[in-house]
Image (cartoon, rainbow, N blue to C red):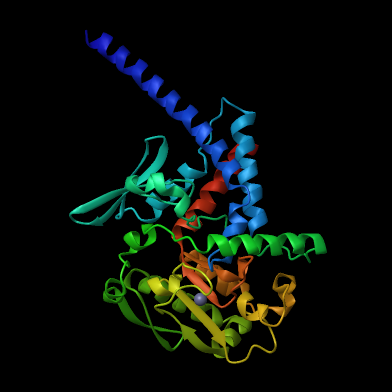
């Protein structure tokens, strides 16, 4: 009798796993069709990555799914949700494939937990799912390990960028779901400011979300330690003039809140820029094709400083297509997503 039950359980298990996997294939191919171009649409937001790279990554994911039906690799939705779980184990309680999509159970308070569905990167609650067209995607992008090689855009490519920027202005009128605020407890100004702590960072005062104060203390300590043997790093430390941290505001020209308004970002500006460019939007005032400003004309912190920030969970805005070279923001899930995507790619090639 027990054997029969065990056998029945095994059959049910195989059946549910397989139907889950096939749904996932459909979900993911639908996702890559819907989303080709979505990444570049979203580029106006401060936290956007290189659009072409993201689009290429989506295509390669689609190939993986259609080329080999035997080796099933996790799709983008599963990778993102598992990265969130790994990055925030105390707040993301579990990851599940439920109601035909990947979802995370987010602990908002001791009394409240909410399922957030991937929903093509929109991160929606069950009640919001029918309303998906009114939300814009959260940014879970592919963050490059190295600064991508800079290439001047051809006139045709520049024209395509201009057209995509026009589409962005439509997308910018949409809001993001409250997922990030529920994750960080930053829905209202009052709630956010209750979570801020004072920090001293490279000798400057600032206020940040209490969850990242320790990470910034480590960055400060590690960069200073490196400065004792590395003259370029010491010169960078000595050049620091301004540090911007918490700031209750929305991102210029969009409906989105900046990571500064969550207390999760820092800007570091030197005493003098020596004519170099730091932020695409400031450059756009003087130069319409701001994307064609080569790295040699942009202000960059030393690569070793950037690596220390990254090792402590921060992405650097200088790697974004919409460059913001003074900006670092805390995105451990993006770092984990990157590492896990690499791992899968390496496994596929073997
Ligand atoms: Zn910033």
Q: From the viewer's perspective, is residue 210 above or below residue 137?
A: below
Placement of the C terminus among the 4 image quadrants: top right
Q: From the viewer's perspective, is residue 143 above or below residue 63?
A: below
| Residue situated furthest left in the rendering | 111
Counting labels gives 0
- Percent across and percent down for residue 185 are 30, 65
Residue at 62% in and 60% down: 167
- Percent across and percent down for residue 86 are 39, 51
- Quadrant in which residue 305 is drawn: bottom right
- Quadrant in which residue 200 is drawn: bottom left
Residue at 57% in and 55% down: 142
User: Can residue 146 be seen at all in this image of the molecule?
Assistant: no
The answer to whether residue 57 is left or right of residue 119 is right
- Percent across and percent down for residue 126 are 33, 45
- Percent across and percent down for residue 214 are 36, 72
- Quadrant in which residue 247 is drawn: bottom left
The answer to whether residue 234 is left or right of residue 137 is right
Placement of the N terminus among the 4 image quadrants: top left
Q: Foreground residue, 174 or 115?
A: 174
Residue at 44% in and 74% down: 260
User: Can residue 326 be seen at all in this image of the molecule?
Assistant: yes
């Amino acid at each position: 009798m027990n054997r029969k039950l065990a056998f029945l359980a095994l059959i049910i298990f195989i059946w549910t796993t397989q139907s889950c996997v096939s749904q996932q294939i459909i979900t993911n191919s639908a996702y890559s069709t819907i989303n080709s171009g979505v990444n570049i649409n979203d580029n106006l937001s401060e936290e956007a990555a290189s659009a072409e790279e993201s689009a290429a990554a989506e295509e390669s994911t689609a190939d993986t799914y259609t080329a080999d039906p035997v080796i099933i690799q996790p799709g983008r939705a599963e990778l993102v949700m598992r990265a969130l779980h790994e990055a925030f184990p105390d707040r993301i309680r579990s990851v599940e494939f439920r109601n035909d999509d990947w979802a995370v159970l987010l602990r908002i308070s001791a009394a409240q937990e909410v399922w957030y569905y991937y929903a093509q990167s929109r991160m929606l609650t069950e009640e919001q799912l029918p309303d998906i067209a009114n939300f814009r995607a959260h940014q879970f992008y592919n963050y490059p390990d190295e600064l991508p090689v800079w290439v001047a855009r051809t006139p045709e490519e520049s024209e395509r960028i201009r057209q995509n920027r026009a589409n962005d202005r439509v997308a910018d009128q949409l809001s993001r779901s409250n997922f990030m605020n529920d994750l960080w407890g930053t829905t209202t100004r009052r709630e956010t400011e209750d979570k801020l702590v004072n920090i001293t960072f490279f000798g400057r005062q600032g206020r940040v979300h209490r969850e990242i104060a320790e990470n910034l203390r480590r960055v400060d300590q590690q960069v200073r330690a490196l400065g004792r043997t590395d003259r370029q790093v010491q010169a960078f430390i000595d050049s620091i003039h301004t540090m911007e941290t918490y700031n209750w505001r929305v991102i210029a020209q969009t409906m989105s809140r900046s990571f500064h308004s969550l207390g999760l970002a820092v800007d570091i500006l030197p005493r003098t820029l020596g004519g170099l460019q730091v932020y695409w939007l400031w450059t756009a005032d003087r130069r319409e094709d701001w994307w064609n400003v080569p790295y040699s004309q942009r202000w960059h912190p030393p690569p070793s400083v950037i690596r220390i920030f990254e090792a402590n969970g921060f992405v650097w805005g200088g790697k974004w297509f919409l460059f913001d070279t003074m900006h670092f923001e805390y995105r451990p899930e993006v770092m984990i997503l990157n590492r896990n995507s690499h791992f899968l790619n390496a496994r596929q090639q073997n």
